[in-house]
Amino acid sequence: MNALVIYDSVFGNTEKIAQAIAAALDTSAIPVSQADGGQLHGLDLLVVGSPTRGFRPTESISKLLNGLPKNHLAGVRVAAFDTRIMLETIDSKALRFLVDKGGYAAKTIVKTLEKKGGQLAASPDGFFVTSEQGPLKDGELERAADWAKLIHSNRAA
């Protein structure tokens, strides 16, 4: 399987998740700063990840994906993940409400990937950090690897 993981990371947490996913898929993970649309030709699977920043992916991830032509990902299975703070750990009721209603980056990434012709390989997922800067919550690297294995095992679907 020809797969690629593209990610952006602000505090290093999303990079760690991307590396765990790539290892489980036996492929490479590259930062969005090194990615371009040409690298996506011939892929069987593309996984894209970003920290959630203001309910959305980072500007760099959005710029890369929005810059792809309409059917650039036709025939490519796609998946998306994000890193996020657990809703229950947000002290402010108002902020908790906003986060609950605003959503997370992975869902936005998936919508864009599908608009570019990608076929959803797995539901978007979020991996938890203990605070804005991290670290990752215990067990999240293992959960990310398990998610990647699920994507791999669903490849015939």
Image: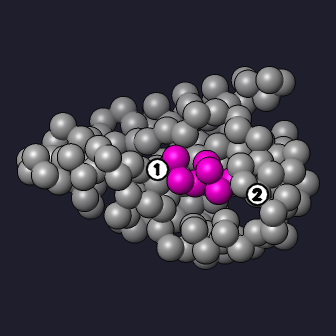
Q: Examine the structure image and report whether residue 15 is included in the region drawn in magenta.
A: no
Using a 10 Å C-alpha cutoff, classify the residue at mark 2 as few (fewer than 14 neighbours), some (14 to 19) or many (20 or more): many
Which residue in the structure is indicated by mark 2?
A: 116
Residue 141 higher or lower than 33, as above or below: above
Residue 62 higher or lower than 129, as above or below: below
Say which of 14 and 71 sits in front: 71
Precedes in sequence: disc 2 or disc 1: 1
Q: Position of residue 95 (x, y in %)?
A: 17, 54
Q: Examine the structure image and report whether residue 112 is included in the region drawn in magenta.
A: yes
The three-letter amino acid code for the residue at tag 1 is Asp
Say which of 9 and 58 sits in front: 58
Q: At numbered mark 2, what does the secondary structure look like: helix, strand or loop?
A: loop
Using a 10 Å C-alpha cutoff, classify the residue at mark 1 as few (fewer than 14 neighbours), some (14 to 19) or many (20 or more): many
Q: Is residue 41 visible?
A: yes
The three-letter amino acid code for the residue at tag 2 is Lys
Separation (CA) of disc 2 from disc 1: 19 Å
In this rendering, the count of numbered labels is 2
| Residue visible at 51% across and 49% down in the picture | 106
Q: Main secondary structure of the magenta part?
A: helix
Say which of 100 and 57 sits in front: 100
| Residue visible at 72% across and 30% down in the picture | 152
Q: Quadrant of the N terminus?
A: top right
25 to the left or right of 133? right
Residue 88 higher or lower than 69, as above or below: above
Mark linked to residue 82: 1
115 to the left or right of 80? right
Q: How is the image coloured?
A: one colour
| Residue visible at 81% across and 68% down in the picture | 69
Q: Identify the magenta region.
A: 107-113
